[in-house]
Amino acid sequence: MKHARSRLPLLLAGVLSAGVFLHAAAAEPEKKGPAPEGLPTPDYLPDTARALLRKKMDRHGLDARELMYGVTLLRYDVARGAAQRIASEPRLSRPTPGGEDDLNTALPERFFVLQDEARLRAQALMAAAEKRDDKALAESYGLLVQTCVSCHSVYLKPQ
């Protein structure tokens, strides 16, 4: 029994250290910075269109990372806020007749379909976070990520 008592302070220190580590890992990211690396640059887009999309997607990427933390750590307010920003992000408008010189004409129609789908799926995720429905939160997050991957694929390979 004496041997077990001598390990008690060590055990308590280990548990407390693990608790502090887990608490720090679960905390919201305090600094938002650029993504480590983005998508490759597609050749079919003019430089101006790529620059505009890059700026939009950098903001979107920060929200997507925060959303991942919010959902996986069940931080409902964080998830709801990130989903709301994604849902309310200004969308690129579809090309209009006579606007053949507009930058958005270089993007395939599927890009615009996925953009609309992402908004709807982000709204569903917001609703799940508001209800604190873990199952719906996970499912809506999976569907939103599926849309994101599809959109990135269309961006890189427009055919």
Image (spheres, grey):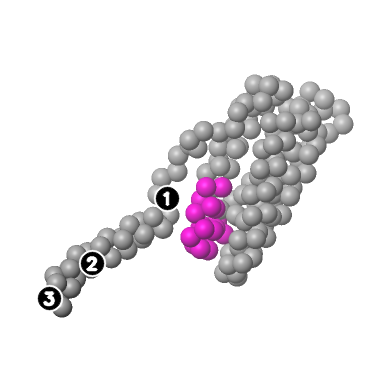
Question: Which is the main secondary structure of the residues drawn in magenta?
Answer: helix
Q: Between marks 1 and 3, how big is the CA–CA gap?
A: 44 Å
Left of 44 or right of it: where is 75? left
Amino acid type at image mark 1: Pro
Q: Residues within 10 Å of mark 3 (few under 14, many from 20)?
A: few
Image position, residue 111 (x, y; %): 74, 38
Residue, x 65% and y 59% (percent of image)? 140
Query: Is 159 or 88 nearer to us in this picture?
Result: 159
Pointer 2 or 1: first along the chain: 2
Amino acid type at image mark 3: Lys
What is the span of residues highlighted in magenta in the rendered image?
A: 64-81
Image position, residue 37 (x, y; %): 51, 33
Amino acid type at image mark 2: Leu
Pointer 3 or 2: first along the chain: 3
Q: Please say if the residues under marks 2 and 1 sit with CB atoms less than 8 Å apart.
A: no
The answer to whether residue 80 is magenta is: yes
Secondary structure type for disc 3: helix
The image's mark for residue 29 is 1
